[in-house]
Amino acid sequence: MIKTLAKSVRGFKTATLLTLLFIMGEVFIEVLIPTTTADLINIVKAGAALDQVLKAGLVLIGMAMVSLCCGTLAGYTCANASAGFARNLRRDIFVRVQSFSFENIDKFSTASLVTRLTTDVGNVQMAFMMVIRTAIRAPLMFTFAIIMAYRMAGRLAMTFVIVVPVLVIGLLLIARHAMPAFRAVFRKYDRMNESIEENVRAMRVVKGFAREDYEKEKFATASHNICLDFTKAERLVALNNPLMQLCVYFNMVFVLLVGAQIVVSSGGTVIDVGQIQAMLTYGMQILMSLMMISMIYVMLTMSIESMKRICEVLNEESSLSNPPEPVTEVKDGSIDFDHVSFKYAKTAAKYALEDIDLHIPSGSTVGILGGTGVGKSSLVQLIPRLYDVTEGSVKVGGVDVRDYDMDALRGSVAVVLQKNELFSGTIKENLRWGNPQATDEELTEACRLAQADEFVRSFPDGYDSWIEQGGTNVSGGQKQRLCIARALLKKPKILILDDSTSAVDTKTDALIRAGFRSYIPETTKIIIAQRVASVEDADLILVMDNGRISAMGSHEELMQSSEIYREIYQQQTKGGAQDEE
């Protein structure tokens, strides 16, 4: 896990190493300051001349300035290293997610990925910062202060034999009981983020059903559960402070009482007032170091869960990959399904598709009809290799899709979904997703063929009009037409419309299909639809049922041979006419 995360330090190794060096310098100076202070107190007590006092004072000032510079530089380099590490880590997670296949994405919820990119990365960043700064400083300070205390005060340093075990055991017990609560929080963060995401994305549905109070209650419950866990953990961690104060005051009382007795009984020959003052300072340094170590332990233990969740994403290998010598050019848009069977998971009991044997010539138009859940979308997702077949093979341009470079294959296939996405930006920027080099004239032509030009020009800023995230400021039909125009600009070998004209009227639907015939006649067009009218003039119509091709043929042939097709047609035509009468 550490090895995986350490890869994201790249580019900031120098800042990390400099932080460690500056911290070591700061600690070394800090543990020398009490000794120098003790010497100054003793020479003042002994009646030293003013020049000796000034000389010792200047040494102290110089040491303090060096320590301050080291601490400042350590803070600067630590901030650069930790922020840079977090930036790299966030980018690595995002890049990894982009490489995932649909099968990989299915393992993680959207809300979970968002939590890993935000909260979890923030926790790991904080842990990294503490490791390269506090986790080095605290043990060094503890070790050096113990050595200097025994070197200077001898028997008086026995106070630490009592104080240190008490503090260590107490801090470990507190951390042990606080950790389960911290670990539970992250899973609850996912549930809370899911609640937020669902509510925001489905705001119209929530308001349409007047379920605001229900959503508020659901969010409040998720938020309250997180609050309870954090409250429990924070209450336990809060015990650190009184425990620390107890040990500090015990150390002060012990040093002052025992030290005063030694000074009086020995006449200042064993230890003197300066050593007592130094012991108080070293005691504070030692106890504060232990406190910092306990906080590091708490933070690292809490961050381990975040580290594991991040590494789950970083170590997830895409289920799809390019072959050793991939084919980089798609010859044409011909498609061949050779006895294809497919299921979404190897352990799934049921196949989503079974024994699909289908051959589509390049440039033809194919319509697909069928009820919900019969495998229509599953069928077309195999063409751009969003999933791999379980059995059989899918060929595009005469080549198995598994032999293609995936970017080359997907660059030749355009998919327009029923719920396709528009991104925040201008209409022009959204359209150029299909072709970044498209001219304004090509944008206009694609929109005209997709029946989008007229409504785009009706906007005050035309093609420079702003689209909100997800296209929330345009209607469903407008969004679909813009997505179709975006796909047309790609001029693909294969165009797949997955029920992507469901929100437009039949006249507009017919005009869009007419545009396909004139603009991309050599492109293979696959149209999944619920309306027979959308596929009636297709070269080939497939009727799917329960993961199989129930029937195929032209409209006239299916009217004679397919009961399912005939029933759909009659429901949408004769049934509709009777209802109107």
Image (cartoon, rainbow, N blue to C red):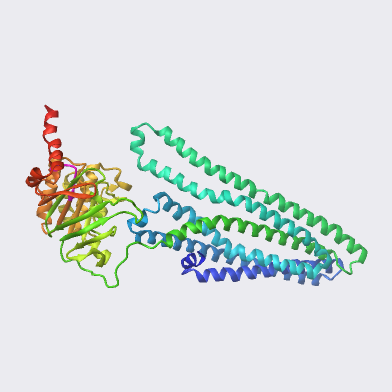
The C terminus sits in image quarter? top left
Residue 283: say if magenta. no
| Residue 96 on image: x %, y % | 39, 61
Residue 262 vs 109, above or below: the answer is below
**Left or right placement of residue 98 versus residue 140 in this view:** left
Percent x, y for residue 352?
27, 51
Q: Residue at x 77, y 53 (%)?
A: 249
Q: Residue at x 34, y 56 (%)?
A: 346
Q: Position of residue 143 (x, y in %)?
A: 70, 67
Q: Residue 303 sits in which quadrant?
A: bottom right
Q: Which residues are magenta?
A: 527-532
Q: Is residue 387 above or below residue 50?
A: above
Residue at 50 percent across and 56 percent down: it is: 306
- Would you identify the image quadrant in which residue 152 lies? bottom right
Which of the two residues, 39 or 514, is positioned nearer the viewer here? Answer: 514
Q: Nearer the viewer, residue 5 or 264?
A: 5
Q: Is residue 245 visible?
A: yes
- Looking at the image, the residue that sits furthest to the top is 581
- Front one among 467 and 354: 354
Locate residue 486, reporting x and y percent. Answer: 22, 53
User: In terms of depth relative to the viewer, which is nearer, 317 or 132?
Assistant: 317
Left or right: residue 60 versus residue 521 is right
Residue occupying image coordinates x 9% and y 52%: 539
Kindly indicate the quadrant of the structure image that contains residue 254. bottom right
In this rendering, position of residue 121 left or right of residue 257: left
- Is residue 452 visible in the rendered image? The answer is no
